[in-house]
Image: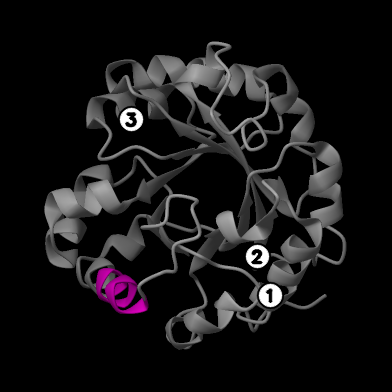
Amino acid sequence: MTTTPYIGVTGFMSREQVEAALVDFPFSPFIKLMVGVLVSDKTLSGVPNSYPNSFPRPDDIADIFVDDPRVLNLVHYNTHDQKGLARQLDTVFEIAGPNCHGAQLNISWPNVEELKLLHYAWRDKQIVLQLGRVAFEAKQSPEVVAKYLGIYKHLIDYILFDMSGGFGVEINIGLATDCYGEYLKQGLNRHFGFGLAGGLDAEGIARLIPLFRTSQTLSIDAQGKLRSSDQLDLEKVRAYIQAALQLYKPVRK
């Protein structure tokens, strides 16, 4: 299993925002900028979301994703109807256009059979599974979580440890470290990558330094603390990206 680590920014609403975030981002085989666009089952069906400045209209999504070797373009999808997940993602990928590389599933323990259907239909798409607070509490411990994650071997490309859910709650480094240790102990690193999220911005990156001293293969994602007045703040985005790049020693501009 080979996955490229990424520095993620979630909540893009326009192509211009993506292009601004890519200014000074290196062309490197060691790192990608993950461009995250939020979609829900409601917005997919044309129902306005409670956060209209975070969820673009479905017809606008394809234009947000740029064709650039530095990016990993992902739809971040949540749904209240897991039984139809594969079918819903068929629609998501169709409207997201040819530059969409896959999806992050903001879903608690999605059905394996649905993911198998998705894998067979969209083998070229990368899948990130969010390990959120609800999913973690259902299994109660890093050891049990890691063992259960084994059912997703060959079906996902990354697991994202994210207790924040996009609301800027700071990451619990101790718990994240324990989860990462169990992930390695169970040999899951042979099957999918490991990512971290939770209250990250340019200043918060420093909390991750101890983990990155042990591994340069980790990915990260940020959302809530990169916003001002409910809008993606491009100055905060660029500062966060530049701080995050320092975590990856092989990266050269």
Report helix, strand or loop for mark 3. helix
- Between circles 3 and 1, the one closer to the viewer is 1
Q: In this view, does 28 lie above or below 135?
A: below
Q: Quadrant of the C terminus?
A: bottom right
The percent coordinates of residue 25 (x first, y second) are 80, 64
Q: Is residue 206 above or below residue 140?
A: below
Residue ID at (65%, 25%):
96
Tag 1 residue: 245
Residue ID at (65%, 68%):
30
Q: In this view, does 135 lie above or below 146?
A: above
Q: Give the range drawn in magenta.
A: 173-180
Q: Which mark, residue 31?
A: 2
Tell me: 53 left or right of 176: right
Whole-number angstrom distance, CA of label 2 to CA of label 1: 9 Å
The percent coordinates of residue 252 (x first, y second) are 77, 78
Q: In which quarter of the image is residue 225?
A: bottom right
Looking at the image, do the residues carrying marks 2 and 1 touch, with CB atoms under 8 Å apart? yes
**Considering only order in the chain, which callout, 1 or 3, is on the residue closer to the N terminus?**
3
